[in-house]
Amino acid sequence: MNYKHSFGFSPKYIEEVTPKISTRAYIEIAKKAYEKLDWELIYENDSELNGLRCNDFGSVKEKISISVTDAKKIKIQSKSENGIWDMGNNHKRVKTFIETFDSILDSITAEEIKQIEEKAIAKDNWDDYVIPEKLTPPLKYKEPFIPSLIIGYLLLALGLGYIISLLSLNGLYVLFLFEVLVGLILSYSLKIFLPLSGYTDFKNIKMVILGSIILLFLSNQFFQFLHFQKEYTELTFGTFISERLKQGFLLKGINIGTVGQIAIWVFQIGFSYLIAYINVLKIIIGYTIDRVPDDVINFAIYNMAKNKTESEIKTELSKKGWKNEIEHEVVFEAIGCIYGGQQINRNI
């Protein structure tokens, strides 16, 4: 077969087919095709699948998605992640999926297809869910208190600033390596600070971490200033910074000047924040979900699937021992993180 070649940033190929079976059954059988082709399925719902095909080194080569259109057709898309020319691979991937799907479909009977559809619909509607007589009792959840988080990061930033100042004064500071370490330390410290504060708002937490990185940078400079002030008693912090800028920055023996020094400082703050940011959301999602027992989450999702309002779900939770507002909030936050994590996977 001559495959069509696509060009552009993240080139892709899309094909629509008219299914011979119901769209719900199509999605379920498509999952079997993903499995047979050894594609990683990262997101699914009753009308969409998203998956990845990786190379031997674990790097993503193509993103493959199957979705139901408004016209009840099936849209099959393969999108490359590297380069601007796909060399026909996206067209090949779509055709390979269609051939594999048709092969699976031909191997099963009409009755089996009907059973697959009925089972999928029952799963969507939680028809097989058995309502538990009781739920795992709630933990003693804290009222969210951001000052605990801020104080923890304040002390951590000052401590790291002092350590890095000592390393810098002794010529042991390694650019790139220490920015990575700072980002990792600040982000993974959340595993300690989240249980202490009970605070999980991502927007505010990322601002606290950015502020901590800026404070760490300033305290690093200030501790170095205190070291030199012992010898130069009239030295002020402003003069110290001014002299640092005048001296510039040595990069592999080349002085890249004042502009270079400013660029390095901006890089140190920005790169550390980037490393922290990448990990923070994952840690918050994990903590928010893990602090609520699975049976409680499933019970709340079941009631959502039965179209109960938030107030009605809270009433059902109260009947099972989850009675106060904080307990209700942690349940809804956990469910929000589950769906949020699914959307992140969907858009990877």
Image (tube, rainbow, N blue to C red):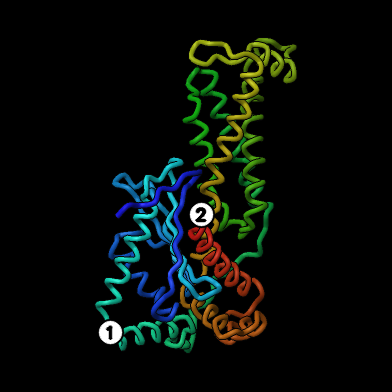
Q: Earlier in the sequence, mark 2 or mark 1?
A: 1
Q: How far apart are marks 2 and 1 (CA)?
A: 43 Å
Label 1 belongs to which residue?
109
Label 2 belongs to which residue? 282
Q: Which residue is drawn at 31% across and 86% down?
A: 110
The reply to whether callout 2 and callout 1 are in contact (CB within 8 Å) is no
Decide which of 3, 146 is in the foreground and name it.
3
- Residue type at numbered disc 1: Thr
At x 40%, y 86%, the residue is: 118
Number of marks in the rendered image: 2
> What amino acid is found at the position of numbered circle 2 in the picture?
Lys
Observer-nearest residue: 167 or 71? 71
At label 2, counting other C-alpha atoms closer than 10 Å, the crowd grade (few under 14, some 14-19, many 20 or more) is few
Residue 258 in picture, x, y percent from top left = 66, 16
Residues packed near mark 1 inside 10 Å, few (<14), some (14 to 19) or many (20 plus):
few
Q: Is residue 218 above or below residue 234?
A: below
Left of 31 or right of it: where is 290? right
Helix, strand or loop at label 2? It is helix
For image coordinates 72% across by 13% down, the residue present is: 235
Residue 207's spot in the image, x, y percent? 66, 46
- For this view, does 321 lie left or right of residue 112? right
Quadrant of the snapshot with the N terminus:
bottom left
Whole-percent x, y for residue 83 in the image: 44, 40
